[in-house]
Image: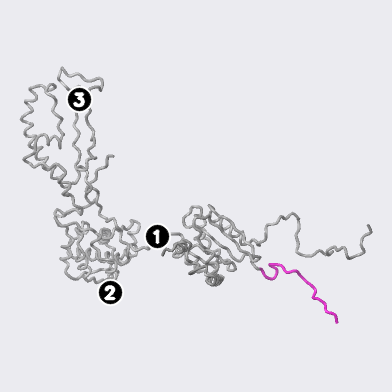
Amino acid sequence: MRRISRLGKPSGARLAPTARPLAPLCTPRAAATRPSPTPAAVTINTLRFYSSRQPEPLPASLTSGGKSAAAAPESVEELAAEELEVQQFDHQSQQRVFVPPPRPSVAERADTITDTLYTPATTAEGLESIGGLGSWWDDPAHWPETSDFVGFKPKHKVQEPALLEAAVRRALTETLVMKQLGQEEQLTGIWGLQGKAQHDAVLALDIRVDSDGTATVTGDLHAVADGLVVKDGEPNVDSADVLPSAAEALAWKQQADQSWKGTSLQDARLKFAVIKRVMQLTGQVVPDQKLADIATARGLLATLSKPPKPKTFSQEIETKKQDLVALPNVAFSPKRVTRGHKDQALGRYKLIEAEFRKRDLQDGPLSVPKSREKKHWNGEA
Amino acid sequence: MTIRALEKISVGQNGIGSFILQCKRLDIHYCDHSGSSRGMNAFIKTHLAKFAQTHPAIEFAVSPRPRKHPVMIGHYINGRQKSICVANMEPSQILKKAELLRDASGDKVKRVNKPVTSVNESVRGIWSPYHGNGMAV
């Protein structure tokens, strides 16, 4: 099956010149399996393999001698230019991870051929079949697994409230730092993912919020800003390793000052940068229709930390329909009501148990399910 | 002095003086997953709270019955039960069925083919072969 080619590059990324994408664009495996000729070893054959913009040279029987002689000096320059192009192409193909198929070549039109001996074929019999990609994409060397699309948003979505709060606090701090340092153009760029040490360092910064919601960060701002710049050659950090564990986040939340939640997010650039960073850290996407309602960091937290959807209808009734469950004449049971429950309600259940025990018929309460009873009969634990 | 029984002035009838609802309890069963319970689940969510609030004399027992059709069972003070399967019904239809169970007396459904029914005794009394002059055959 032919697959659609995709680039392993974050979409919509506006990278700085020194920045590197999040995913490794060139893997050892891809480099090892793909033919990568050195500039000295580049031959005309390999040139034709990678670039076939020029029509293929026709057989000698179809070309006039004078024309080919005239084309010879031109083709040397072209070959030199193509050699350079191939080197660039090879460099690019190392940057990408999949190898694209060669460009299609176009045959000369029959009415433009000047050779008098040429006779156009009237049937397909005896003709060579050319064209098509063949099994190009079936070759794993052309299509390694590492060439799969790596998105900006991590696949795992963080749901724990304490972790979400820590991530929002970190995103807000980093955004405010960039703004305070005057690097406003970096607010829309890609920021690097550093380890937990950086996370703790960012959370250690103090945020003071004024009455109008304007926030000021104090501390070592430049260290934080340097950590956000993506550098070449850095190992790729998984977003799951960036945030602390849920227990650590909870411990931080309990002792942290909560005044930072009043920070205003009315500035659209600030709001965008915070939400973008939160998405990168947690995998949580804020729907477009809710963007306008978010005015503070507290509002953003409320949007992100919504309770999970109830699994069953019974759970939904228990959690959301308290007006029904709390009525004095309504008895709601989330589980099936059995005969045993009815006996319990009547006070008959303990009498039955006592009578069974007297006759040595039932060891243990009646509420033990039949399947476990069977196990006991068979002598199993 | 002879003892005389009190004369019966009137026959007790429900609704004259006081009204006692015959339906004492309504069991409401649903399934969490089955499609036939979709209407019942919507009824529980939207209509039941108001219905239960307006009928404090009825006890409502709501519980799931997995992998079964939704059912409403009315229990009556005469000891009888009346159950209705409400599979694939709309919430408004289920509300009608709940009202039907509420209004039912719990008696067996009897055929009524007389134009007038009365709880009052006949003015002429009940005929007895041992009273009166008898008939000459």
Give the SS element for disc 2. Answer: helix
Q: CA distance from mark 3 to mark 1?
A: 65 Å
* Majority secondary structure of magenta residues: loop
Mark 1: amino acid: Lys
Chain where mark 2 sits: A
Tell me the mark number nearer the camera, choosing from 3 and 1.
Answer: 1
Residue hosting label 3: A109
Q: Nearer the viewer, residue A284 or A127?
A: A127
Give the SS element for disc 1. Answer: loop
For the point 21% across and 46% down, the residue is: A144
x, y percent for residue B57: 60, 68
Give the SS element for disc 3. Answer: loop
Mark 3: amino acid: Arg
Q: Indicate the quadrant where residue B101 lies.
A: bottom right
Residue hosting label 1: A309
Q: Quadrant of the N terminus of chain A?
A: top left
Q: Quadrant of the C terminus of chain A?
A: bottom left
Q: Is residue A266 located in the magenta-colored stretch of the structure? A: no
Mark 2: amino acid: Gln
Residue A255, numbered label: 2
Magenta part of the chain: B1-19
x, y percent for residue A75: 8, 31
Taking the view exactly as shown, the residue that stands out farthest to the right is: B136
Q: Are marks 3 and 1 on the same chain?
A: yes
The tag earlier along the polypeptide, 3 or 1, is 3
Can I make out residue B41 in this image? no
